[in-house]
């Protein structure tokens, strides 16, 4: 069984702070890898030691395999935690960590590689008896093959990158006349973003909700830790997450969580992971989308509902411990909502706007949690994502959680850059959100209907 005394944090921002705190709770020393742009970050301040891994550009720092591994080895670390984003789902990096004698705090490289290929993961879901939407079983190789599949399943269809996520390499195609150009654009975007231009076709379903199931595995046994509803999005990127999903009946919840355990069990999953679905709430049907082999941005929602520390469990599993919980021991209480507070201008299509935080004051009080790396005077670098903080609230029921979120949002003070705070304040009062009558295109088609920036979403 590997021993973990020191963890090298190969990430930045709020997730680096979160990993540091989990390690401290476990009595584990931390070393923060940082780029030149993050030299004065909160993650650097909190860690026991910090090592500069390169210039501000991610390719020279947080995506630089050699620099990260060299920094970990030089600092005496036993393990590397990749967080989310950057190299968190890079099988080659995981293999290099293990080859260097470092414990990789994540899933097995073979599983990362398999589930990172969406077409392969889709095929696995079919083999596991899990519903998938109609489409291709393998990446399409020619426009003619794509047209044949699209005509068979019926337009509109989605062209999707086999590797990657975050909405990149994805196109909605309404007719055959648009298919060839969409294939080319999606493939080029996927190749540039992920180094893999393979794409596949699936039926585009609308309106739907986006539901994900949290799983934990130790390589031998898998449990689920409930679901999160991630339906409120813009450009296929999440803005708000909540749990449990108000759209699921107990019967559908049981079917979805069972299917997530089945998929993760089939690959002998180890670590924390998430199985994602689209759900036709009216018909109470669900379809597998993909599996993320990492901790998710929205993992605090599950932590608030279950009382578990998912990051600490990741570390303990990586250290060789078996899952400490049976499925029957995992219980949920109340309702939780998370709002992502980004340095973005919703009035201009959620355009990222980095800058200096001239004021930063986070809310608190009963049932309120803030995960952030920000502080007054912090300079948000233009090189990375726009996340400032995650505001998570808990209530005994959804309405209590919504009211608490509304209160907490009014307490949150961020000045110096435009943020999504006012957007979230408005969302919490929207009748459709209050009744949970929403879908994945709700922001674009309803909240921003007629808005000058609607075309940007």
Image (cartoon, grey):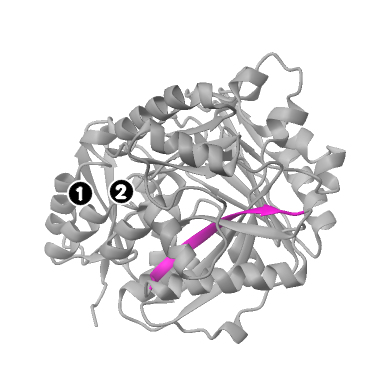
Towards the viewer: 143 or 93: 143
Towards the viewer: 88 or 308: 88
The image shows residue 46 at horizontal and vertical percentages of 38, 52
The image shows residue 443 at horizontal and vertical percentages of 70, 32
State which tag comes first along the sequence, 1 or 2.
1
What secondary structure is found at the residue carrying circle 2? loop
Give left or right: position of 210 versus 3.
Answer: right
Towards the viewer: 429 or 456: 456
Number of disc labels: 2
**What crowding class fits label 1: few (fewer than 14 Cα within 10 Å), some (14-19), or many (20 or more)?**
many
Q: Quadrant of residue 106?
A: bottom left
Q: Which residue ends up furthest to the top in the rendered image? A: 452
Q: Are marks 1 and 2 in contact (CB under 8 Å)?
A: yes
Q: Tell me: residue 449, above or below residue 74.
A: above
Kindly identify which numbered label has been placed on residue 413. Answer: none
**Residue at 64% over, 58% down:** 286
Q: Quadrant of residue 12?
A: top left
Please say whether residue 292 is visible from this viewpoint: no
Give the residue pinned by disc 2: 87
Give left or right: position of 395 versus 2.
Answer: right
Please state the extent of the stretch shown in magenta in the rendering: 269-281
Within the magenta stretch, is there residue 276? yes
The image shows residue 168 at horizontal and vertical percentages of 44, 34
Q: Tell me: residue 283, above or below residue 33.
A: below
The image shows residue 352 at horizontal and vertical percentages of 51, 25
Give the residue pinned by disc 1: 68
Foreground: disc 1 or disc 2? 2
Give left or right: position of 274 versus 6.
Answer: right
């Amino acid at each position: 069984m590997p021993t973990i005394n020191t963890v090298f944090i190969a990430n930045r921002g709020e997730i680096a702070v979160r990993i540091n705190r989990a390690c401290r709770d476990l009595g584990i020393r931390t070393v923060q890898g940082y780029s030149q742009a993050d030299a004065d970050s909160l993650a650097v301040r909190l860690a026991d030691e910090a090592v500069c891994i390169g210039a501000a550009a991610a390719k020279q720092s947080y995506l630089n395999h050699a620099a990260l591994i060299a920094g970990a080895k030089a600092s005496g670390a036993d393990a590397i935690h990749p967080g989310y984003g950057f190299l968190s789902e890079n099988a080659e990096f995981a293999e290099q960590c293990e080859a260097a004698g470092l414990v990789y705090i994540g899933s097995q490289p073979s599983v990362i590689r398999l589930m990172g290929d969406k077409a392969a993961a889709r095929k696995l879901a079919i083999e596991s008896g899990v519903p998938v939407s109609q489409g291709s079983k393998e990446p399409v190789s020619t426009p003619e093959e794509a047209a044949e599949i699209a005509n068979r399943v019926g337009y509109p269809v989605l062209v999707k990158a086999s590797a990657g996520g975050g909405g990149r390499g994805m196109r909605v195609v309404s007719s055959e006349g648009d298919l060839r150009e969409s294939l080319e654009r999606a493939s080029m975007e996927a190749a540039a973003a992920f180094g893999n231009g393979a794409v596949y076709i699936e039926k585009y379903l609308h309106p739907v909700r986006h539901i994900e199931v949290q799983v934990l595995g130790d390589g031998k046994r898998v449990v689920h830790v409930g679901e999160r509803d991630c339906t409120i999005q813009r450009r296929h990127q999440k803005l708000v997450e909540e749990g449990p999903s108000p759209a699921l009946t107990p019967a559908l919840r049981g079917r979805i969580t069972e299917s997530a355990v089945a998929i993760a069990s089939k690959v002998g999953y180890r670590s924390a992971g998430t199985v994602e679905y689209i759900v036709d709430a009216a018909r109470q049907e669900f379809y597998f989308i993909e599996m993320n082999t990492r901790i998710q941005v929205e993992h605090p929602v599950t932590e608030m509902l279950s009382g578990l520390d998912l990051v600490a469990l990741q570390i303990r599993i990586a250290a060789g411990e078996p899952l400490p919980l049976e499925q029957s021991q995992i219980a949920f209480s109340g309702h939780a909502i998370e709002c992502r507070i980004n340095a973005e201008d919703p009035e201009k299509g959620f355009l990222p706007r980095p800058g200096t935080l001239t004021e930063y004051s986070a809310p608190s009080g009963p049932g309120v949690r803030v995960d952030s790396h920000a502080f007054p005077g912090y300079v948000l670098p233009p090189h990375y994502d726009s996340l400032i903080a995650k505001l998570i609230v808990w209530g005994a029921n959804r309405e209590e959680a919504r009211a608490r979120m509304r209160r907490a949002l009014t307490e949150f003070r961020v000045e110096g850059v435009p943020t999504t705070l006012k957007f979230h304040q408005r969302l919490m009062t929207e009748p459709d959100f209050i009744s949970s009558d929403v879908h994945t295109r709700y922001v674009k088609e309803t909240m921003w209907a007629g808005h000058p920036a609607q075309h940007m979403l």
